[in-house]
Amino acid sequence: MADQYEVLRTVFGYETFRGDQEEIVAQVIGGGDAVVLMPTGGGKSLCYQIPALVRDGCAIVVSPLIALMADQVGALQQLGVRAAYLNSTQSFEQRIAVEEAYLTGELDLLYVAPERLSQPQTREFLSRGTLSLIAIDEAHCVSQWGHDFRPDYLALGDLAQLWPDVPRIALTATATDRTHREITERLHLGGARHFVASFDRPNISYRIEPKDRPQQQLLEFIRAEGFDDGVPLTGIVYALSRKSVEKIAKFLCANGIDAMPYHAGFDAQTREDTLRRFLREDGVVVVATIAFGMGIDKPDVRFVAHLDLPKSVEGYYQETGRAGRDGLPSVAWMAYGLADVVQQRRLIDSSDGDQAHRMAQGRLLDSMFALCETATCRRVQLLRYFGQEIAPCGNCDTCLRPPATWDGTVAAQKVLSTVWRLDREFGGQRYGAGHLVDILVGKTNARIEQFGHDRLSTYGIGTELDQAGWRGVIRQLIAQGLLAPRGEYGVLALTEDSRAVLSGERTVTFREETQRIRSGSSGRPK
Ligand code: ADP
Ligand code: ZN
């Protein structure tokens, strides 16, 4: 049987492994479990595809991206790999043929939708063949508080007991501590080796500016950045609604940019044509909803622009990560406004699902907004979100043109001492941002009266800002690691660093817009 180096070369046509691939592959071939956190484009697929070809039996690949399964399997078959998939898009005959091939040992990889793998009959059927390994792709879908939760992923936890001798590898491009923990716990990967790749994309320059006249700003950005010696560059523009996608594409075309709209409302043929032009030609700009991009591998995308705020930092990172996969300089540009946040919060509040889930989504949105409002290096802030520390990059907008700031030390002290007093004087109870704001501005309501929080010495001391202003301050404190949201309900707790602010040893700086936005009326910082 061929070893992993031979498979890498002869099947996939690559000379060397990248990053942690070599160690991950060895771990799984050796029969051990692995948890892999690697950014999009990092090369996760080979981490299970190569062990699947080296080990005896057939590998099961769990993936929620049913729409992409046929493509993924097709690409493998082109390389001569014996791969197939089982999902709800197939006819009965197709399914029977795949099952036959599996049972007679003619498959090396079998892609399966998660809902199928939670069914007893599928498990019983798979047990009749020989499993080489189980790969759980997009493993962050197991995280209940993440942006992609799939209930079927929870059932994948018992695979550990069902097939104790089959190595399992969980992979994701989401690297927050919390997701990492949840993957490990819920998928019972306590004995696994963990591989955490750096999420830094040094060739991407991050720029985020307040939204004023969005289309005009976008056009100016593309005119300034989107050409190389007069030759247009390939880019993706993301917007939230289908309507704005079409409007923006039309606007760009009218201004001499070769732009094409893309969203799920177009028929399959049109979408395919758009995709083909984007992949094959240079200088095409696709204006799209986030439906565009999953699994698209074009190395020379030079810019990704956002005209609406993504719902989470994970989403932002994933979408901007489609720029510059070839390692050459690229730009991630975004225009944001308070109105975006207000609109998305309204959507969250009116969405189905329980209170805890809405709170979690609100927190994801807050982190995204905090990234927009940061007065420090965007890249530092972005990577800190994923639990990684780096030095200021010197290449993002805040590094290149430090924004106007204000000294928020006193405001920060007011918030932090309120949290501290609540904790000390009211027996370890903790509260969320809304309640803290009510105390600071001296609001009277049932909760405050019931708890007697109007007796706190910080009650009503925050008259210099209004409620939106204080919320901005709290968001920034969270972003700077001076307050930590805990648990499902987003109660706020002090961190190790808060103490230095309370004792006056450390000052706190906020971006000017945080203060201006406080009036909330125009929602448009200048
Ligand atoms: P991910 O799933 O992490 O987003 P992929 O597995 O799709 O990433 O890989 C991204 C790209 O990198 C693909 O085009 C893949 O062929 C390429 N790639 C992966 N590993 C290697 C390697 N060792 N050498 C060269 N190219 C690689
Ligand atoms: Zn920077």
Image (cartoon, rainbow, N blue to C red):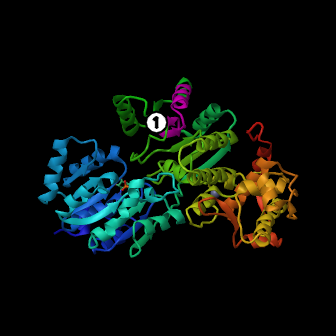
In the rendered image, residue 383, in percent from the top left (x then y), is placed at 57, 61
Quarter of the picture containing the C terminus is: top right
Q: Residue at x 47, y 51 (%)?
A: 148
- Position of 462 with respect to 526 (left or right) is right
146 up-or-down from 230: above or below: below
Residue holding disc 1: 283
- Position of 498 with respect to 105 (left or right) is right
Q: Residue at x 43, y 71 (%)?
A: 194
Q: Residue at x 48, y 65 (%)?
A: 182
- Position of 412 with respect to 52 (left or right) is right
Q: Residues within 10 Å of mark 1 (few under 14, many from 20)?
A: many
In the rendered image, residue 73, in percent from the top left (x then y), is placed at 26, 49
Q: Secondary structure at mark 1?
A: loop
* Ligand 1, image quadrant it occupies: bottom left
- Position of 387 with respect to 406 (left or right) is left
Task: Please provide the residue range marked out in magenta.
Answer: 229-251
Quarter of the picture containing the N terminus is: bottom left
Please tell me whether residue 232 belongs to the stretch shown in magenta: yes
In the rendered image, residue 514, in percent from the top left (x then y), is placed at 76, 50
